[in-house]
Image: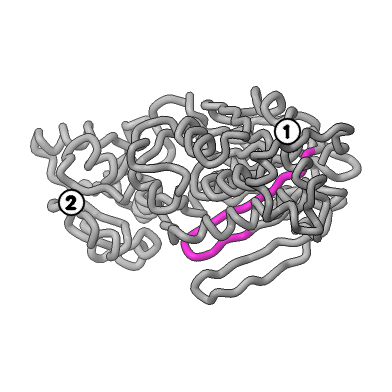
Amino acid sequence: MNAPKTELPELNNEEIGRYSRHLILPNVGMEGQRKLKGASVLCVGTGGLGSPLALYLAAAGVGRIGLVDFDVVDASNLQRQIIHGTSWVGKSKVESAKARIADLNPNVQVDVYEEPLTSDNALAIVEPYDVIVDGTDNFPTRYLVNDACVLLGKPNVYGSIFRFEGQASVFNHEGGPCYRCLYEEPPPPGLVPSCAEGGVLGILPGIIGVIQATEIVKIILGVGETLSGRLMLYDALGMNFRQLKLRKNPKCVICGPNPTVTELIDYNQFCGVPSMDEGARPTDVSQTDEGFARLSVKDIKAKLDAGWAPFVLDVRKPHEADIVKLDFADLLVAHEDVAAHLAEIPKDRDILVHCKMGGRSAKASKVLADAGYGSVTNMEGGITGWANEIDPSLPTY
Protein backbone atom coordinates (compact mmCIF):
# COMPACT_ATOMS: atom_id res chain seq x y z
CA MET A 1 0.00 0.00 0.00
CA ASN A 2 1.12 3.57 -0.56
CA ALA A 3 2.72 5.47 2.31
CA PRO A 4 0.11 6.53 4.87
CA LYS A 5 -1.38 9.94 4.40
CA THR A 6 0.06 12.53 6.80
CA GLU A 7 -3.33 13.89 7.76
CA LEU A 8 -6.25 11.59 8.30
CA PRO A 9 -9.84 12.84 7.96
CA GLU A 10 -11.79 13.45 11.14
CA LEU A 11 -14.98 11.57 12.06
CA ASN A 12 -18.17 13.50 12.66
CA ASN A 13 -20.64 12.56 15.39
CA GLU A 14 -22.80 10.54 13.02
CA GLU A 15 -19.80 8.50 11.91
CA ILE A 16 -18.67 7.93 15.49
CA GLY A 17 -22.06 6.44 16.24
CA ARG A 18 -22.12 4.44 12.99
CA TYR A 19 -18.68 2.91 13.52
CA SER A 20 -18.89 2.53 17.30
CA ARG A 21 -18.29 -1.24 17.20
CA HIS A 22 -15.05 -0.58 15.34
CA LEU A 23 -13.99 2.23 17.62
CA ILE A 24 -14.02 0.02 20.71
CA LEU A 25 -11.76 -2.56 19.02
CA PRO A 26 -8.18 -2.01 20.25
CA ASN A 27 -6.78 -2.75 16.78
CA VAL A 28 -9.02 -0.16 15.14
CA GLY A 29 -10.02 2.69 17.44
CA MET A 30 -10.37 6.27 16.27
CA GLU A 31 -7.10 6.27 14.36
CA GLY A 32 -7.91 3.05 12.51
CA GLN A 33 -11.37 4.26 11.56
CA ARG A 34 -9.85 7.49 10.27
CA LYS A 35 -7.46 5.38 8.18
CA LEU A 36 -10.44 3.59 6.68
CA LYS A 37 -12.16 6.88 5.94
CA GLY A 38 -9.00 8.21 4.30
CA ALA A 39 -8.42 5.10 2.20
CA SER A 40 -9.46 4.36 -1.37
CA VAL A 41 -10.19 0.96 -2.92
CA LEU A 42 -10.83 0.09 -6.57
CA CYS A 43 -13.20 -2.85 -7.10
CA VAL A 44 -12.74 -4.38 -10.54
CA GLY A 45 -16.09 -6.08 -11.11
CA THR A 46 -19.42 -5.69 -9.32
CA GLY A 47 -20.60 -9.26 -9.76
CA GLY A 48 -20.47 -12.28 -7.46
CA LEU A 49 -17.29 -11.25 -5.65
CA GLY A 50 -17.64 -7.50 -6.09
CA SER A 51 -21.10 -7.44 -4.53
CA PRO A 52 -20.27 -8.60 -0.97
CA LEU A 53 -16.85 -7.02 -0.82
CA ALA A 54 -18.12 -3.60 -1.95
CA LEU A 55 -20.98 -3.76 0.56
CA TYR A 56 -18.71 -4.65 3.45
CA LEU A 57 -16.07 -2.07 2.50
CA ALA A 58 -18.75 0.60 2.39
CA ALA A 59 -20.24 -0.55 5.69
CA ALA A 60 -16.76 -0.58 7.26
CA GLY A 61 -16.28 3.07 6.33
CA VAL A 62 -13.76 2.98 3.48
CA GLY A 63 -13.98 6.58 2.32
CA ARG A 64 -13.63 6.16 -1.42
CA ILE A 65 -14.65 3.16 -3.53
CA GLY A 66 -14.18 2.88 -7.27
CA LEU A 67 -16.36 0.47 -9.26
CA VAL A 68 -15.33 -0.84 -12.68
CA ASP A 69 -17.91 -2.77 -14.71
CA PHE A 70 -19.61 -2.29 -18.08
CA ASP A 71 -22.25 -4.98 -17.75
CA VAL A 72 -25.95 -4.67 -16.94
CA VAL A 73 -27.85 -6.56 -14.27
CA ASP A 74 -29.34 -9.83 -15.50
CA ALA A 75 -31.95 -11.86 -13.63
CA SER A 76 -29.49 -14.78 -13.46
CA ASN A 77 -27.10 -12.54 -11.48
CA LEU A 78 -29.46 -12.18 -8.53
CA GLN A 79 -28.79 -15.69 -7.20
CA ARG A 80 -25.38 -14.47 -5.96
CA GLN A 81 -24.77 -10.79 -6.81
CA ILE A 82 -26.43 -9.44 -3.69
CA ILE A 83 -25.64 -5.76 -4.25
CA HIS A 84 -28.21 -5.73 -7.09
CA GLY A 85 -31.98 -6.08 -6.93
CA THR A 86 -34.84 -7.07 -9.21
CA SER A 87 -35.71 -3.44 -9.95
CA TRP A 88 -32.24 -3.00 -11.50
CA VAL A 89 -32.49 -5.86 -14.04
CA GLY A 90 -31.46 -4.54 -17.45
CA LYS A 91 -29.77 -1.49 -15.95
CA SER A 92 -26.14 -0.57 -15.28
CA LYS A 93 -24.35 -2.66 -12.67
CA VAL A 94 -22.13 0.17 -11.49
CA GLU A 95 -25.08 2.49 -11.07
CA SER A 96 -27.00 -0.23 -9.24
CA ALA A 97 -24.04 -0.82 -6.91
CA LYS A 98 -23.56 2.91 -6.38
CA ALA A 99 -27.20 3.36 -5.39
CA ARG A 100 -27.03 0.46 -2.94
CA ILE A 101 -23.83 1.78 -1.35
CA ALA A 102 -25.33 5.26 -1.03
CA ASP A 103 -28.27 3.77 0.85
CA LEU A 104 -25.98 1.69 3.06
CA ASN A 105 -23.48 4.44 3.87
CA PRO A 106 -23.91 7.94 2.40
CA ASN A 107 -20.50 8.95 3.78
CA VAL A 108 -18.71 6.91 1.09
CA GLN A 109 -17.55 8.54 -2.16
CA VAL A 110 -18.31 6.18 -5.04
CA ASP A 111 -16.57 6.55 -8.39
CA VAL A 112 -18.03 4.62 -11.31
CA TYR A 113 -16.20 3.48 -14.43
CA GLU A 114 -18.82 2.06 -16.77
CA GLU A 115 -16.30 0.75 -19.25
CA PRO A 116 -14.17 -2.35 -19.74
CA LEU A 117 -10.77 -2.24 -18.07
CA THR A 118 -8.24 -2.34 -20.90
CA SER A 119 -4.54 -1.83 -21.48
CA ASP A 120 -5.35 1.68 -22.64
CA ASN A 121 -7.16 2.87 -19.52
CA ALA A 122 -6.04 0.56 -16.70
CA LEU A 123 -3.11 2.58 -15.39
CA ALA A 124 -5.11 5.80 -15.27
CA ILE A 125 -8.02 4.09 -13.48
CA VAL A 126 -5.86 2.14 -11.01
CA GLU A 127 -3.36 4.86 -10.11
CA PRO A 128 -5.49 7.00 -7.70
CA TYR A 129 -6.40 4.08 -5.41
CA ASP A 130 -4.56 2.61 -2.44
CA VAL A 131 -5.72 -0.99 -2.81
CA ILE A 132 -7.03 -2.87 -5.85
CA VAL A 133 -9.40 -5.81 -5.50
CA ASP A 134 -9.91 -8.26 -8.33
CA GLY A 135 -13.50 -9.51 -8.56
CA THR A 136 -13.31 -10.56 -12.21
CA ASP A 137 -14.13 -13.89 -13.81
CA ASN A 138 -11.83 -14.01 -16.83
CA PHE A 139 -8.12 -14.53 -17.32
CA PRO A 140 -7.29 -11.53 -19.55
CA THR A 141 -8.57 -9.09 -16.92
CA ARG A 142 -6.86 -10.96 -14.07
CA TYR A 143 -3.49 -10.64 -15.79
CA LEU A 144 -4.24 -7.03 -16.67
CA VAL A 145 -5.12 -6.16 -13.06
CA ASN A 146 -2.01 -7.94 -11.82
CA ASP A 147 0.34 -6.19 -14.22
CA ALA A 148 -1.17 -2.76 -13.59
CA CYS A 149 -0.77 -3.31 -9.84
CA VAL A 150 2.86 -4.37 -10.19
CA LEU A 151 3.74 -1.48 -12.47
CA LEU A 152 2.09 1.02 -10.09
CA GLY A 153 3.11 -0.66 -6.82
CA LYS A 154 -0.43 -1.43 -5.63
CA PRO A 155 -1.55 -4.46 -3.59
CA ASN A 156 -3.86 -6.78 -5.53
CA VAL A 157 -6.46 -8.59 -3.41
CA TYR A 158 -7.43 -11.61 -5.48
CA GLY A 159 -10.36 -14.02 -5.38
CA SER A 160 -11.90 -16.54 -7.73
CA ILE A 161 -14.82 -18.97 -7.58
CA PHE A 162 -16.06 -22.02 -9.46
CA ARG A 163 -18.95 -24.34 -8.64
CA PHE A 164 -18.37 -25.18 -4.93
CA GLU A 165 -14.75 -24.02 -4.61
CA GLY A 166 -13.03 -20.69 -4.17
CA GLN A 167 -9.59 -19.25 -3.60
CA ALA A 168 -8.11 -16.00 -2.36
CA SER A 169 -4.73 -14.36 -1.92
CA VAL A 170 -3.02 -10.99 -1.71
CA PHE A 171 -0.55 -10.31 -4.50
CA ASN A 172 2.19 -7.69 -4.87
CA HIS A 173 2.11 -6.71 -1.20
CA GLU A 174 5.18 -5.91 0.87
CA GLY A 175 7.55 -7.78 -1.44
CA GLY A 176 5.30 -10.80 -1.84
CA PRO A 177 4.57 -12.72 -5.04
CA CYS A 178 2.26 -11.51 -7.79
CA TYR A 179 -0.41 -13.39 -9.72
CA ARG A 180 2.09 -14.32 -12.45
CA CYS A 181 4.31 -15.96 -9.83
CA LEU A 182 1.43 -18.40 -9.22
CA TYR A 183 0.13 -18.67 -12.77
CA GLU A 184 2.94 -17.96 -15.23
CA GLU A 185 0.75 -18.76 -18.22
CA PRO A 186 -3.02 -18.73 -18.70
CA PRO A 187 -4.79 -22.04 -19.35
CA PRO A 188 -5.73 -22.86 -22.94
CA PRO A 189 -8.86 -20.97 -24.05
CA GLY A 190 -12.04 -22.79 -23.04
CA LEU A 191 -10.32 -25.25 -20.68
CA VAL A 192 -11.79 -23.59 -17.58
CA PRO A 193 -15.56 -23.08 -17.97
CA SER A 194 -17.05 -19.78 -16.87
CA CYS A 195 -19.61 -19.64 -14.08
CA ALA A 196 -22.23 -19.23 -16.81
CA GLU A 197 -21.34 -22.67 -18.19
CA GLY A 198 -19.99 -24.45 -15.12
CA GLY A 199 -22.30 -23.00 -12.50
CA VAL A 200 -21.56 -21.61 -9.03
CA LEU A 201 -23.14 -22.04 -5.61
CA GLY A 202 -24.78 -18.68 -4.94
CA ILE A 203 -23.38 -18.43 -1.40
CA LEU A 204 -19.79 -19.15 -2.46
CA PRO A 205 -18.86 -15.66 -3.76
CA GLY A 206 -20.19 -14.22 -0.50
CA ILE A 207 -17.63 -16.22 1.45
CA ILE A 208 -14.69 -15.42 -0.84
CA GLY A 209 -15.74 -11.78 -1.30
CA VAL A 210 -15.94 -11.25 2.46
CA ILE A 211 -12.46 -12.75 2.83
CA GLN A 212 -11.22 -10.29 0.22
CA ALA A 213 -12.87 -7.42 2.11
CA THR A 214 -11.23 -8.61 5.33
CA GLU A 215 -7.80 -8.59 3.69
CA ILE A 216 -8.37 -5.07 2.38
CA VAL A 217 -9.34 -3.75 5.81
CA LYS A 218 -6.26 -5.40 7.37
CA ILE A 219 -4.02 -3.84 4.72
CA ILE A 220 -5.49 -0.39 5.34
CA LEU A 221 -5.25 -0.71 9.11
CA GLY A 222 -1.83 -2.36 9.03
CA VAL A 223 -2.93 -5.13 11.40
CA GLY A 224 -2.84 -8.91 11.37
CA GLU A 225 -1.29 -11.24 8.83
CA THR A 226 -2.51 -10.99 5.26
CA LEU A 227 -2.71 -13.74 2.66
CA SER A 228 0.41 -12.42 0.93
CA GLY A 229 2.56 -15.45 0.18
CA ARG A 230 -0.36 -17.80 0.77
CA LEU A 231 -3.16 -19.13 -1.43
CA MET A 232 -6.28 -19.93 0.57
CA LEU A 233 -8.47 -22.68 -0.91
CA TYR A 234 -12.06 -23.21 0.18
CA ASP A 235 -14.24 -26.27 -0.48
CA ALA A 236 -17.88 -25.62 0.34
CA LEU A 237 -18.96 -29.25 -0.03
CA GLY A 238 -16.34 -30.46 2.43
CA MET A 239 -16.59 -27.22 4.44
CA ASN A 240 -12.85 -26.94 4.80
CA PHE A 241 -10.12 -24.40 4.23
CA ARG A 242 -6.53 -25.16 3.36
CA GLN A 243 -3.54 -23.08 2.38
CA LEU A 244 -0.65 -23.34 -0.03
CA LYS A 245 2.54 -21.37 0.48
CA LEU A 246 3.45 -19.11 -2.41
CA ARG A 247 6.92 -17.86 -3.15
CA LYS A 248 8.03 -15.01 -5.33
CA ASN A 249 9.27 -16.35 -8.64
CA PRO A 250 12.80 -15.02 -9.23
CA LYS A 251 12.18 -15.40 -12.96
CA CYS A 252 8.78 -13.68 -12.94
CA VAL A 253 8.43 -11.67 -16.13
CA ILE A 254 6.97 -8.64 -14.37
CA CYS A 255 7.88 -8.64 -10.66
CA GLY A 256 11.22 -10.45 -10.91
CA PRO A 257 14.61 -8.68 -10.82
CA ASN A 258 14.87 -8.75 -14.62
CA PRO A 259 11.34 -8.09 -15.90
CA THR A 260 10.56 -8.49 -19.56
CA VAL A 261 7.01 -7.11 -19.23
CA THR A 262 7.50 -3.41 -18.54
CA GLU A 263 4.21 -2.11 -19.91
CA LEU A 264 0.69 -3.36 -20.37
CA ILE A 265 0.22 -5.77 -23.26
CA ASP A 266 -2.65 -7.20 -25.33
CA TYR A 267 -4.14 -9.55 -22.72
CA ASN A 268 -6.77 -11.06 -25.01
CA GLN A 269 -3.98 -12.13 -27.33
CA PHE A 270 -1.87 -13.34 -24.39
CA CYS A 271 -4.74 -15.53 -23.18
CA GLY A 272 -5.78 -16.63 -26.67
CA VAL A 273 -9.16 -14.93 -26.42
CA PRO A 274 -10.63 -13.23 -29.52
CA SER A 275 -10.80 -9.46 -29.15
CA MET A 276 -14.23 -7.82 -28.96
CA ASP A 277 -13.59 -6.00 -32.22
CA GLU A 278 -12.45 -8.97 -34.28
CA GLY A 279 -15.88 -9.19 -35.86
CA ALA A 280 -17.91 -12.21 -36.77
CA ARG A 281 -16.32 -15.61 -37.12
CA PRO A 282 -16.26 -17.24 -40.58
CA THR A 283 -19.38 -19.28 -41.23
CA ASP A 284 -18.17 -21.25 -44.25
CA VAL A 285 -16.03 -24.28 -43.44
CA SER A 286 -13.85 -23.48 -46.44
CA GLN A 287 -12.88 -20.19 -44.81
CA THR A 288 -11.54 -21.69 -41.59
CA ASP A 289 -8.91 -24.24 -40.63
CA GLU A 290 -11.02 -25.55 -37.75
CA GLY A 291 -12.65 -28.17 -39.93
CA PHE A 292 -16.20 -27.16 -39.06
CA ALA A 293 -18.56 -24.28 -39.75
CA ARG A 294 -19.86 -21.72 -37.27
CA LEU A 295 -23.35 -20.31 -37.78
CA SER A 296 -25.49 -17.94 -35.75
CA VAL A 297 -28.84 -19.14 -34.44
CA LYS A 298 -30.61 -16.91 -36.95
CA ASP A 299 -28.70 -18.44 -39.86
CA ILE A 300 -29.41 -21.93 -38.54
CA LYS A 301 -33.13 -21.17 -38.19
CA ALA A 302 -33.23 -19.90 -41.75
CA LYS A 303 -31.56 -23.08 -43.02
CA LEU A 304 -33.92 -25.28 -41.02
CA ASP A 305 -36.92 -23.39 -42.38
CA ALA A 306 -35.55 -23.95 -45.88
CA GLY A 307 -35.53 -27.72 -45.36
CA TRP A 308 -32.13 -28.43 -43.83
CA ALA A 309 -32.34 -31.61 -41.74
CA PRO A 310 -29.08 -32.14 -39.85
CA PHE A 311 -28.43 -34.64 -37.08
CA VAL A 312 -28.60 -32.45 -33.97
CA LEU A 313 -26.15 -33.22 -31.18
CA ASP A 314 -26.61 -31.62 -27.74
CA VAL A 315 -23.29 -31.75 -25.85
CA ARG A 316 -24.50 -30.42 -22.50
CA LYS A 317 -24.87 -32.39 -19.27
CA PRO A 318 -28.10 -34.33 -18.61
CA HIS A 319 -29.07 -32.03 -15.72
CA GLU A 320 -28.87 -29.07 -18.13
CA ALA A 321 -31.19 -30.80 -20.57
CA ASP A 322 -33.63 -31.23 -17.68
CA ILE A 323 -33.84 -27.41 -17.56
CA VAL A 324 -34.44 -26.83 -21.26
CA LYS A 325 -33.82 -28.66 -24.53
CA LEU A 326 -34.52 -28.28 -28.22
CA ASP A 327 -37.34 -30.59 -29.28
CA PHE A 328 -35.49 -31.43 -32.50
CA ALA A 329 -32.27 -32.63 -30.83
CA ASP A 330 -31.35 -36.23 -31.74
CA LEU A 331 -28.69 -37.15 -29.17
CA LEU A 332 -27.47 -35.88 -25.80
CA VAL A 333 -23.80 -36.57 -25.04
CA ALA A 334 -21.54 -34.50 -22.79
CA HIS A 335 -18.89 -32.75 -24.89
CA GLU A 336 -15.99 -34.58 -23.24
CA ASP A 337 -17.59 -37.94 -24.10
CA VAL A 338 -18.28 -37.33 -27.78
CA ALA A 339 -15.24 -39.34 -28.94
CA ALA A 340 -16.62 -42.40 -27.13
CA HIS A 341 -20.01 -42.11 -28.88
CA LEU A 342 -18.98 -41.69 -32.51
CA ALA A 343 -20.79 -44.91 -33.47
CA GLU A 344 -24.09 -43.21 -32.56
CA ILE A 345 -23.45 -40.20 -34.80
CA PRO A 346 -24.06 -40.75 -38.53
CA LYS A 347 -21.38 -39.81 -41.03
CA ASP A 348 -23.81 -39.59 -43.93
CA ARG A 349 -25.68 -36.54 -42.58
CA ASP A 350 -24.84 -32.97 -41.74
CA ILE A 351 -24.15 -32.56 -38.00
CA LEU A 352 -25.38 -29.58 -35.98
CA VAL A 353 -23.77 -29.32 -32.53
CA HIS A 354 -24.95 -27.11 -29.70
CA CYS A 355 -24.39 -26.53 -25.97
CA LYS A 356 -25.48 -23.72 -23.68
CA MET A 357 -23.53 -20.87 -25.27
CA GLY A 358 -21.27 -22.32 -27.98
CA GLY A 359 -17.97 -23.02 -26.26
CA ARG A 360 -18.28 -26.70 -25.44
CA SER A 361 -20.00 -27.42 -28.73
CA ALA A 362 -17.03 -25.89 -30.58
CA LYS A 363 -14.74 -28.39 -28.84
CA ALA A 364 -17.08 -31.23 -29.73
CA SER A 365 -17.27 -30.00 -33.33
CA LYS A 366 -13.50 -30.12 -33.54
CA VAL A 367 -13.51 -33.70 -32.25
CA LEU A 368 -16.01 -34.66 -34.94
CA ALA A 369 -14.08 -32.86 -37.67
CA ASP A 370 -10.85 -34.58 -36.62
CA ALA A 371 -12.70 -37.92 -36.68
CA GLY A 372 -13.57 -37.45 -40.35
CA TYR A 373 -17.03 -35.95 -40.17
CA GLY A 374 -17.17 -33.75 -43.23
CA SER A 375 -20.08 -31.41 -42.56
CA VAL A 376 -20.18 -30.21 -38.96
CA THR A 377 -21.72 -26.92 -37.84
CA ASN A 378 -21.38 -25.30 -34.43
CA MET A 379 -24.37 -23.30 -33.16
CA GLU A 380 -22.84 -19.99 -32.05
CA GLY A 381 -24.64 -18.74 -28.97
CA GLY A 382 -26.02 -22.17 -28.15
CA ILE A 383 -29.44 -22.86 -26.73
CA THR A 384 -29.25 -19.56 -24.83
CA GLY A 385 -29.00 -17.71 -28.14
CA TRP A 386 -31.83 -19.82 -29.53
CA ALA A 387 -34.05 -18.88 -26.59
CA ASN A 388 -33.15 -15.20 -26.78
CA GLU A 389 -33.41 -14.76 -30.54
CA ILE A 390 -35.60 -17.54 -31.93
CA ASP A 391 -37.91 -19.03 -29.32
CA PRO A 392 -38.49 -16.77 -26.29
CA SER A 393 -40.85 -19.35 -24.78
CA LEU A 394 -37.78 -21.36 -23.78
CA PRO A 395 -36.25 -20.62 -20.36
CA THR A 396 -32.66 -19.46 -20.05
CA TYR A 397 -30.27 -20.46 -17.31
Residue designated by label 2: 326
Q: Count numbered badges in the picture.
A: 2
Q: Residue at x 32, y 32 (%)?
A: 283
Q: With respect to residue 350, does 207 lie above or below?
A: below
Q: Is residue 255 magenta?
A: no
Specify the segment rendered in magenta: 154-167
- CA gap, disc 1 to disc 2? 49 Å
Q: Which mark is residue 277?
A: none
| Disc 1 residue type (three-letter) | Tyr
Taking the spot 35% from the left edge, 50% from the top edge, the residue there is 361
Nearer-N-terminus badge (1/2) = 1
Taking the magenta stretch, the answer to whether it contains residue 164 is yes
The residue at the point 78 percent across, 56 percent down is 228
**Vertical order, 331 against 124 (above or below):** below
Q: Nearer the viewer, residue 352 or 32?
A: 32
Tell me where residue 46 appears, x and y as whole percent.
Answer: 52, 40
Magenta span main SS: strand
Q: Residue under circle 1?
A: 129
User: Horizontally, is 197 left or right of 260 in the view?
Assistant: left
- Can you name the residue that lies furthest to the bottom here? 238
Q: Is residue 242 left or right of residue 299?
A: right
Left or right of residue 325, residue 72 in this image: right
Q: Position of residue 53 (x, y in %)?
A: 59, 48
**Residue 370 visible in the shown view:** no
Image-based side of 137 in relation to 222, left or right: left
Q: Position of residue 290 (x, y in %)?
A: 42, 41
10 Å crowding of disc 2: few (<14), some (14-19), many (20+): some
Disc 2 marks which amino acid?
A: Leu
SS class, disc 2: loop
Q: Is residue 10 visible?
A: yes
Secondary structure, mark 1, is loop
Q: Quadrant of the N terminus?
A: top right
